[in-house]
Image (cartoon, rainbow, N blue to C red):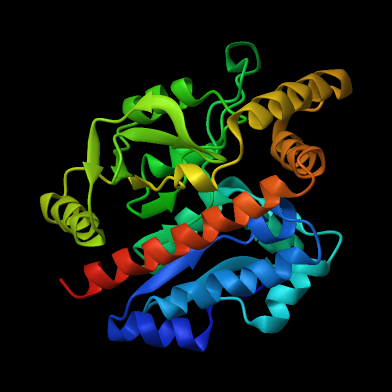
Amino acid sequence: MGDFSIRFKPEVAAALRDGRPVVALESTIMSHGLPRPDNLKVAQEIEQTVRSAGAVPATIGMVGGQLIVGLDEAQLARLATADDVAKLSARDLAVAAALGVDGATTVAATAAVAARAGIPVFATGGLGGVHRAAAESFDESADLTTLAHTPITVVCAGVKSILDVGATLERLETLGVPVVGYRTRRFPGFYLADSGHDLDWSVESSEEVARIMQARESHGVSRAGLIVANPLPADEQLDPELHDRVLADGLAGLARARIAGKAVTPYLLAHFHAATEGRSLAVNIRIILRNAELAAKVALAYAHP
């Protein structure tokens, strides 16, 4: 029998032991969400952004079947450059570990592992959600159900605009996952600052987010996560007309190629990158760097109330 215990980067283990702020980061954005060679450079920039804001970054992934909280430089490079890196949701972790694979963790897997490791804050780009035409396909991201029972704060730019945003918000409400806008009452749409949907709650500072986290912990009523929706400024978003045109073309391409399941998001992100001549990639990078900075500030406020 193998040793399947979660391994920690020494820096991350020390920070958790000492009560210092730590921010969890996913590895799928590096291995499946961004093109090479930008992916490794951006992963390093994300970690540096967390450090500059006063927290310790902990990028989560699997190397040779070993689940690791806090990939080191060599491990980051391995997952960024290998051709056979599996995309791991929470349900896949044990199977992938037993088979000894290299794997990048999705939002669901990263959130689950981070919560298990005692990391209260997680930064990502955009959440998964309910896919378009889900009434026929039942295609819904495990991110939603995972956050229903995983007490972690996720800083994101809403859900990816390629999804059914309204249906996703309805599912989050049903699952008991609170969503607060950061300095906004409108839910962001990843590439877009405004998805067209209202929010019930907003906060003005990282300290307010930390107080929500403290209240949830003190109440002990819900084990659901907290989504902090952090929109891009309107002047940094992808041009809305370009976005809508590219999305329509991408959805048509999905239908023609009969692409479904895990392959949908990588296909559409790659389509956006090609069709916008790299402009969507620049927006994507701005999104994750802004979210990493805010997540670090939240982690700092939570660690030092």
77 or 292: nearer the eye?
A: 292
- Image position, residue 181 (x, y; %): 31, 42
Left or right: 237, with 177 as reference point: right
Residue at position x 55%, y 43% in the image = 237
- Image position, residue 290 (x, y; %): 47, 59
86 or 256: nearer the eye?
A: 256
- Image position, residue 158 (x, y; %): 46, 40
- In the displayed image of the protein, which residue is found farthest to the front? 235
57 or 99: nearer the eye?
A: 57
Residue 4 shows in the view:
no
Q: Is residue 15 above or below residue 100?
A: below
Q: Is residue 302 above or below residue 128?
A: below
- Image position, residue 10 (x, y; %): 50, 88
Left or right: 269, with 204 as reference point: right
Which quarter of the rendering shows the N terminus?
bottom right
Which quarter of the rendering shows the C terminus?
bottom left
Residue at position x 16%, y 57% in the image = 211
Left or right: 297, with 125 as reference point: left
Q: Is residue 170 above or below residue 44?
A: above
Count all numbered tags in the image, as a single digit.
0
Residue 274 shows in the view:
yes
Residue 201 placement: quadrant = top left
Q: Is residue 23 above or below residue 210?
A: below
Residue at position x 55%, y 69% in the image = 46
Residue 121 placement: quadrant = bottom left
